[in-house]
Image (cartoon, rainbow, N blue to C red):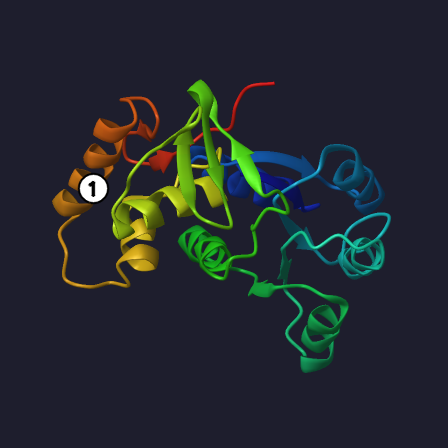
Amino acid sequence: MKILLLEDDYLYKISIKEFLVEIGFEVDDFENGDEALDAVFEKGYDLLLLDIRVPGMDGFELVQTIRQEGLKTPVIILTSLTDITSLSKGYELGCNDYLRKPFDLIELKYRIEQIIKMGCFQSDEDTITLDDSYSFNITSEQLKKEQDIIELTQKEQEVVSLLIQNRGTYLSIETLHEIIWCHKEISYADIRMCIKRIRNKTDEHFIKTKRFVGYKIDTAKK
């Protein structure tokens, strides 16, 4: 997942970026709203983390501009503003969530996972092309190896769908537990076994693992 971070407090920005990179996200950071806006349209991102009071275009103006241009990229506003007028303005302009400063970085992780759970990263494509000749139809949730259908159980299909929905980003085993199993009584060993069964039906590297971070599926390299 590619994240744009707009934050003009240098130490705050670095701590947030280092944390997000450590847990598997790709992050571009900016201190100026005008530069951040240019990057949104030039590079494209899966999530925007925006401070409000920054040099150049402020966070509110940035949200308003991208929404007017039809971009539906999820936005989490990071701010020390606490009055209801400011909070209401952000939601009216089209942000998805607020995080009030100071906040714990783990809370930021949970807020991002909640955005994932809400399905804000759905692709407009019908079929996603993956590594090693695999493809996934997001409508039928059907996984194929070239023209051959890979038969998956319901839970295996849900895991594959969630990882592809967030392709290129590591999702923690805790996130899989929360979203796929809804915190039901199931051990992490059972979740790992589900991952193993998917690999047995595809190949060992179809789902990639990063120790202490999580699992991901990559799209085909261009």
Viewer-side residue, 161 vs 85: 161
Tell me: 194 left or right of 58.
left
Residue 48: x and y, percent? 65, 49
Rate crowding at label 1 as few (under 14), some (14 to 19) or many (20 or more) other CA atoms within 10 Å: some
Residue 93: x and y, percent? 76, 68
Residue 27: x and y, percent? 58, 35
| Residue at image coords 79%, 58% | 67
> Residue 85 lies in what quarter of the image?
bottom right
Tell me: 203 left or right of 8.
left
Q: Is residue 112 above or below residue 81?
A: above
* Residue 166 visible somewhere in the drawing: no
Kindly identify the amino acid type of the residue bearing the numbered disc 1: Cys
Viewer-side residue, 178 vs 148: 148
Residue 37: x and y, percent? 80, 44
Q: Residue furthest bottom?
A: 84
Q: Give the secondary structure at mark 1.
A: helix
| Residue at image coords 16%, 39% | 193
Instruction: Say which residue label 1 marks.
Output: 194
| Residue at image coords 44%, 51% | 109
